[in-house]
Amino acid sequence: MIGNHTIKAGANWDRNADLLDNLDTGAGKYTYTAFADFLADYYHAVQGLGPPAPAYIDTYKGFSQSFGPAGFFITTNDLAGFANDEWRLFPRLTLTAGLRYEYERGPRAFLPNPQLPQTANYPDDRNNFAPRAGVAWDVFGDGGTVVRAGYGVFYGRIVNGTLFSALSSSGAPDTQRTYRYSSPTQPGAPQFPGIFFNPPSGALRGALPSAYFFAKNYQAPETMQGELTVEQKIGWDSVVSLTYLMSQGRDLPNFIDTNIDNATIGQLRYTVDIPGPALGKQSPLAQGAVYTTPLYTSLRPNIFYGSITELLSNVNSNYNAGVLAVRHRTRHGIGFGLNYTFAHALDYNQNEFLYKSPTNILEPNNMALEYGNSSTDVRQRLVVHGNFSTTWHKQGWLGYLLNDYEIA
């Protein structure tokens, strides 16, 4: 402490050494959109039901299989340092300010693909400065009315699973190579339940390997969080608080296939047919409405590969919430309370996969179409809770079991 300042500083170093042993779809993977289609293929293969091949055509919607080494050793070093100053400016007013810096040194690109120079990219995000600030104000000096506010920037790790995706799957012959078929009628596609024992050969469209690479400016995920709380004692050992919460996610991960021909784009037109009443004249999905989506009809520009997936950090999210909380505690160790939250979460369809995800957005050239309510959006939530703390204590080893025992 220096006068009315409380200063803290520190540093941290984490070293992670992971042996990642995972050959995804190494035994082959069939994809179906209907359980009945799977049963049709299964009983045809096992019991010979239906017409014999080649008259019988499988009903699966996709097949993928990977080849290559399963294990890779990845080492990362996480470095961080911080400084924080808590300044009691007045007896009723305290200010807090701090700064944290983080840097994750990942493995340099190994096994890059000479045919795809971008596979030599590796994330090297060095601008992760995270300021924090806060204020606590006892408005009347009696602890009855308190205002608190805070804001901070926080960074996450580029997880080793994401690093593994790019560094082990550059498309080079000695890396993991995945071959995908979008239908059983594609040349070279297997017949259920068959798999390949060697990588498919030939430049067939469905037998091309995939590749992954990091974008040049790939960033660690970032979130900016803010809070404003007004807390009021109302007597009878009860406290009411009203809080505004804000969280904005930035540079969240995304996967986009770059091996598409933007010069040759067709269109698919759908007429929405919804049983029952229309959703409304203003709705784009009303019954009878026409929905149009781009269709990439040309072959892959790079004819030696299927999907060439770029790992990007271009997804944002926004969360805003108001929280009403009531807490009451008796003098006999019994407490209870409730929290009501009204919130809204929106994002650009944040990728839920951090490991070898193919393109998961509707239109690779128009991220704006992805913006909408988050899949984790919960508008209203009510939580009622209670707890009991013992008012007696036991000495000795029983104290570890019985003292301050709480149930909720």
Image (cartoon, rainbow, N blue to C red):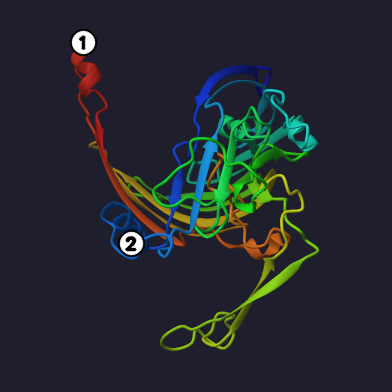
Q: Position of residue 75 (x, y in %)?
A: 61, 19
**Real-space Cα distance between discs 1 and 2?**
67 Å
| Amino acid marked by disc 1 | Gly
Q: Which element carries disc 1, helix, strand or loop?
A: helix
Considering the numbered disc 2 on the image, is that residue within a helix, a strand or a loop? helix
Residue at figure coordinates x 61%, y 83% from the top left: 290
Vertical position of residue 251 compared to residue 275: above or below:
above
Q: Position of residue 308 (x, y in %)?
A: 69, 45
State the residue in front, 148 or 13.
Answer: 13
**Considering depth in this image, is 378 or 91 the residue closer to the camera?**
378
Q: Nearer the viewer, residue 125 or 305?
A: 305
Is residue 71 in sight in this rendering?
yes
For disc 2, the neighbor class at 10 Å (few under 14, some 14 to 19, many from 20) is: some
Residue 255 locus on image (x, y percent):
64, 47
Determine which quarter of the picture holds residue 94.
Answer: top right
Q: Is residue 268 left or right of residue 385?
A: right
Mark 1 highlights which residue?
Answer: 396
Mark 1 or 2, nearer chain start: 2
For the N terminus, give its image quadrant. top right
Q: Closer to the observer: label 1 or label 2? A: 2
Left or right of 312? Residue 318 is left
